[in-house]
Image (cartoon, rainbow, N blue to C red):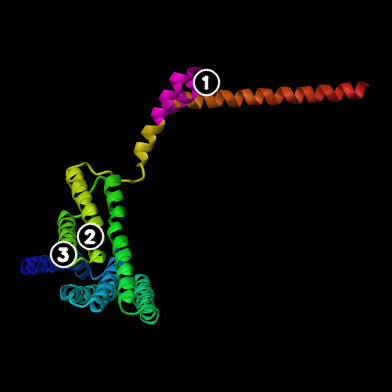
Amino acid sequence: MAVHHHYLTLAFGLLGNIVSFMVFLAPIPTFHKIYKKKSAEGFQSLPYVVALLSCMLWIYYALLKKDALLLITINSVGCVIETIYLALFLFYAPKKARIQTVKLLLMLNVVGYGLMLVLTVLLAKGEKRLQAVGWICLVFNLSVFAAPLCIMRQVIRTKSVEFMPFPLSFFLTLGAVMWFFYGLLIKDYNIAFPNILGFIFGIAQMALYIVYKNAKKTILQEPKLQELSDHVIDVVKISTLVCPAELNTVVLQATNAESTTGNDNKITNENIVENHQVKEKIEETKDGSAQV
């Protein structure tokens, strides 16, 4: 029974390594585009910085735990791959994006990780240190697994799965299953528990993909001039039904240029007559004042 349990644990650990390795290779098409364009403009470095930090955290945890070689192998490979991605990004990124990436690396991977390392070494020892680092890894993984909520919201709004490819969602879900059973078999809930959330979000992403893969895309853009004009005309038409007596002149002005010109002349003549009448009244008032 113990031998069977050992081989089952090894099988899930190896499968987790293989699936996670494929997930690490998923951004290759993105960097192929960056290489062809010779520019990383429009792309973000944050996912790769976070992935590198995650690998660093799990390596530290695995070193403290011992007998966790399969965690060390995949996360060591992940560190190398994510470092290559970041190096390519820094090489092709604009100056502003390059500075932001360096700041992120210094803040998270150097200062943040270094501070965590120093504090856990100085303030905790033995099993307590392992538990503290395990909790840090657990919380960090939960936040990482919750990150796709933003992408899912975008899919629902735009009805487009362009930024949520099905293969990536599938392999993330499959990886979550493998690492959940691996953690369960070695009775390490810091590994098992976050992957429950990863599995749930993975299933949700695949369900959204199936729902919206053939849906008509919703493009959020400003209305064109012709469309805006048609909309205004429609509003005027509706308004004339509500209060035709008040807007009748407006409709006539919008549809008949000659009538507009005639009305303008008529209004001008009326204004002249009114001005003349006002002048006459002023003169009469002056005459009356003089007689008094």
Name the residue carrying label 3: 185
Does the segment drawn in magenta span residue 60?
Answer: no
Identified by mark 1, the residue type is Glu
Q: Residue at x 23, y 52 (%)?
A: 200
In which image quadrant can residue 264 be found? Answer: top right
The residue closer to the viewer here, 36 or 65, is 65
178 or 285, nearer to the observer: 178
Please state which of residues 45 and 5 is positioned toward the viewer in this rendering: 5
- Is 238 included in the stretch rendered in magenta? yes
Could you say where residue 154 lies in the image, as x and y percent from the top left? 30, 50
Q: Residue 158: x, y in percent?
A: 28, 46
The answer to whether the residues at label 3 and label 2 have Cβ atoms under 8 Å apart is no
Find the distance from the CA under tag 3 to the CA under tag 2: 14 Å
Which of discs 2 and 1 lies nearer the camera? The answer is: 2
* Any part of residue 94 in sight: no
Characterize the local packing of mark 1: few (<14), some (14-19) or many (20 or more) Cα atoms within 10 angstroms. Answer: few
Quadrant containing the C terminus is top right
Q: Secondary structure at mark 2?
A: helix
On the question of residue 242 being in view, the answer is yes
Q: Nearer the viewer, mark 1 or mark 3?
A: 3
Task: Say what amino acid the circle numbered 2 marks.
Answer: Asn
Above or below, 229 relative to 180: above
x, y percentage for residue 24? 18, 68
Which three-letter amino acid code belongs to the residue tagged 3? Answer: Leu
Write the start and end of the magenta stretch as one range: 233-255
Tell me the CA gap for discs 2 and 1: 67 Å
Q: Nearer the viewer, mark 3 or mark 2?
A: 3
Residue under label 1, please give it.
246
Disc nearer the start of the sequence (3/2): 3
Marks 1 & 3, CB-CB < 8 Å contact: no
The circle drawn on residue 195 is 2
